[in-house]
Image (cartoon, helix red, strand yellow):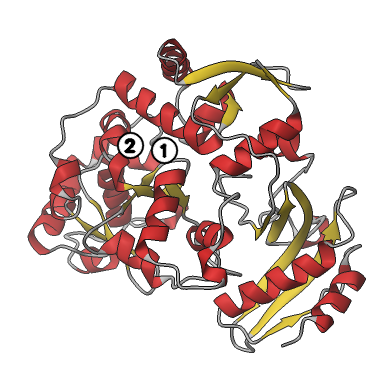
Amino acid sequence: MALTVLQARRIALAAQGFTRPRPGLDSTVNARHLGKVIERLGFFQIDSVNVLARAQYMPVFSRLGPYDQELLHRAAGRRPRRLFEYWAHEAALVDINLWQAFQFRMESGARMWGSMAEIAEYSPEFVQWVLDEVRDQGPLTARQVEHDAPREKANWGWNWSEVKIALEYLFYKGRVTAARRNSAFERVYDLPERVIPPAQFNAPPLDSAEAHVVLVSHAARALGVGTSQCLRDYFRMSPELSKAAIETLVDTGELILTTIAGWNRPAYLHRDAVQPRKVSARALLSPFDPLVFERTRTEKLFDFRYRIEIYVPAEKRVHGYYVLPFLLGDRLVARVDLKADRQSGTLIVHGAWAESHAPDSTADELAQELRLMAGWLGLATVAPPAKGDLAGELSAALARHLD
C-alpha cells in the first residue's frame, strides 16, 4: 500500500481530531467532550511558560474551541480522575487508562537524569524520610516538605533543593504522584494509592514488552500513520522494544505496512485510521501539540519547517519567542508570535508570517481565530502585528472583525 503526502496528512489530521466540529464555537464544552480528546491523544504535554497559555490547555482549545479550563483541572485533580501526571513524551497530563503502561518506566528509571539517581544512591535515608513525610502528612508541596527538612538544603542541578530532587526521584519511580497543581503551578505530592483510582492502581502489571505494545498501539491510533520513529517518539520509547512492538502489531493486523511518497522510511498505517477526502480545520497550535511536536514529521507532512525559539537569544530569533503554527484546511499556512498581556487585557501579535502556499483567505481566517483565542483567554482586544510578511493583511482583517 502506498500513500501520497496529501493522503498521509489528511489521515494524520483526522487521527488528531481535526475533522470533527469544535463544540465550543456554538455551545458549551463538557466533560464528555474533554474525555474524547483525552482518549484520542493520550496526554497533554505540560510546560511552565505562561506567556500565552500554558501548553497543557492549548490542545483542547485547538480541537474543541473555547472551554472552561476548570474542566481540565477537575480531570487532573478530582474524582472521577481522568488524568495523572507523569513523564510521557515529556512532563505531561496522561490518560489514567495508561497508568499500567507506564509502570515499566517507573520500575526501570531508564530516562532518569543524574541528580535524581545520585540522591537515591547517596542519600537513601533522606529519600525515605521525604517519602514518609508525604505518607504521614500529604498531600504536600516541595516547599511544605522543605519546611520540616531535617538538615540544611544543598543545591544540586537546576538549583533544586535536596527535598525537590528526592520528590522528583520518588515521582519518577511512581512512589509518589501529583495529586494536583496549586495556584503557583507547584506539584502537590501524595501517595499514588490515594490518587490513582483503584481500577487502574490495582490492575495487573504489564511487563516492558506488553507496555510497549500498548503504547505503540496508542501512538499509532493518535497519529494515524507514521514511521517507526514517529511511533517511538510519541511516548519517547526505546528503539528495540518499540521495534518489537511494531512487529507484533503488524502480525496481528493492527498496523499495515505502507509507504509515503518522498519519505525514505517505511510507514505504518493504523487499521482504524480514517482517510477523509477533505479537511476543513482551523486552529492555532501550541508548540507542544502532538500534531507538530515531532519536527521532522511536521516538515515532511506539511512542508512547514518549525523550531521553537524560546531559548534562542532575542537578536537571533527568526520569528519570535512564542510562535504558534496556524492550521487552515489541511495545511499549516502561517505562524504568529503571540503574548497575552493580562494587565491590559490584550492579545499581542508581535509578528505574523504566511507560508508560500497560504490561500488568500489566510489573514481573514487567522483574524477570526485570534479573536476567538482572545475571548477564551479573557482578553478584550487583539493588538495587530508590527512585523512579518502577513502583518499588513492581518492588521486589516483584525480591523474588519472588530466586535
Q: Between residue 220 and residue 20, name the one nearer to us.
A: 20
- Residue 125 in sight: no
- Percent position of residue 154, x then y: 33, 56
Q: Which mark is residue 117?
A: 2
* Image quadrant occupied by the C terminus: bottom right
Q: Amino acid at mark 2?
A: Ala
Q: Between residue 116 and residue 62, name the one nearer to us.
A: 62
- Percent position of residue 295, x then y: 67, 39
Classify residue 367 as left or right of residue 78: right
**Which residue is identified by label 1?**
113
Q: Which mark is residue 25?
A: none
Find residue 318 and report its image quarter. Answer: bottom right
Give above or below for 354 relative to 273: below
Find residue 207 and report its image quarter. Answer: top left
What is the CA distance from the residue labelled 1 to the residue labelled 2? 7 Å
Classify residue 11 as left or right of residue 243: right
User: Which residue is farthest front?
Assistant: 277
Q: Between residue 287 and residue 261, name the one nearer to us.
A: 261
User: Which residue is farthest left?
Assistant: 136
* Image quadrant occupied by the N terminus: top right
